[in-house]
Amino acid sequence: MEELFKIIFGSNSKINPQLRDHLEKLLEYRVYKKGEFLCREGQICRRVFFIVSGLVQHYTSDGNKENTTWILKENDIATSVKSYFKQIPSLEFLQALETTSTYSITLDQLNDTIEKFPEFGAVKFNILLNYYEILHDRFSVLSGSKPEQNYNWLMANSPDLSTRAPKKSLSSYLLMSVKKLSDLRDGKKQNRKKK
């Protein structure tokens, strides 16, 4: 549970003991198998997930093609933001790309906790800030960039995703073809071997 409190409050934060006890009783721990959905398009996303270990892919689908918007990993927060906060059907899928351990909380539980412990309101703010930062990176760095720039951005920020995430998901996330991703990966490997 300590990993969770670091995700929620940051590593240096002091936690009110009553709030800690409340959360330990309230938060739901669950392990999702690879391929299992945390939320599907058309369902209301009832929970926000604090990822302890594993990978979660956010994507939309037109029936033929998946469009990956985010790939989140340990210490990230996953939810279908609009669906969760407005309790409306999700426009995206959230799927485990590997065995994924999470703690989660419903919106009612989140709001009740904020009512009892106003300092927990910062967590709601942090969820929104986390998604804003990811969205900002996604659109300012990846949109309109060349595939090489996108791949270099990934390697600078989350190099482990290059080997953990499936090529199909990762290439969609980086806005390139699977072949281009393979070529870039192979090129990087060749460059390392030459050194």
Image (spheres, rainbow, N blue to C red):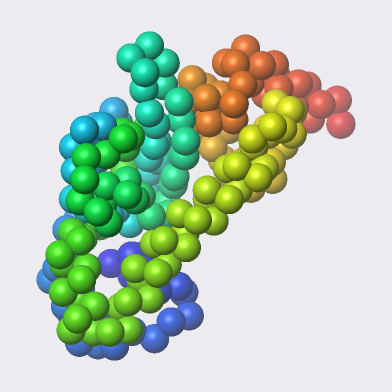
Between residue 76 and residue 65, name the one nearer to us: 65
Above/below status of 110 relative to 168: below
Taking the spot 22% from the left edge, 68% from the top edge, the residue there is: 110
**Quarter of the image that includes the N terminus:** bottom left
Q: Residue furthest right?
A: 195
Q: Is residue 163 left or right of residue 44?
A: right
Between residue 49 and residue 139, name the one nearer to us: 139
Taking the spot 25% from the left edge, 54% from the top edge, the residue there is: 86
Q: Is residue 173 visible?
A: yes
State the count of labels.
Answer: 0
**Quarter of the image that includes the C terminus:** top right
Above/below status of 122 relative to 44: below
Residue 179, image x, y percentages:
62, 12
Q: Is residue 188 left or right of residue 177?
A: right
Dividing the picture into quarters, in which one does residue 149 lie?
top right
Residue 146, image x, y percentages:
74, 28
Taking the spot 45% from the left edge, 73% from the top edge, the residue there is: 10
Taking the spot 61% from the left edge, 21% from the top edge, the residue there is: 176
Residue 191, image x, y percentages:
81, 26
Residue 116, image x, y percentages:
18, 84
Q: Is residue 182 visible?
A: no
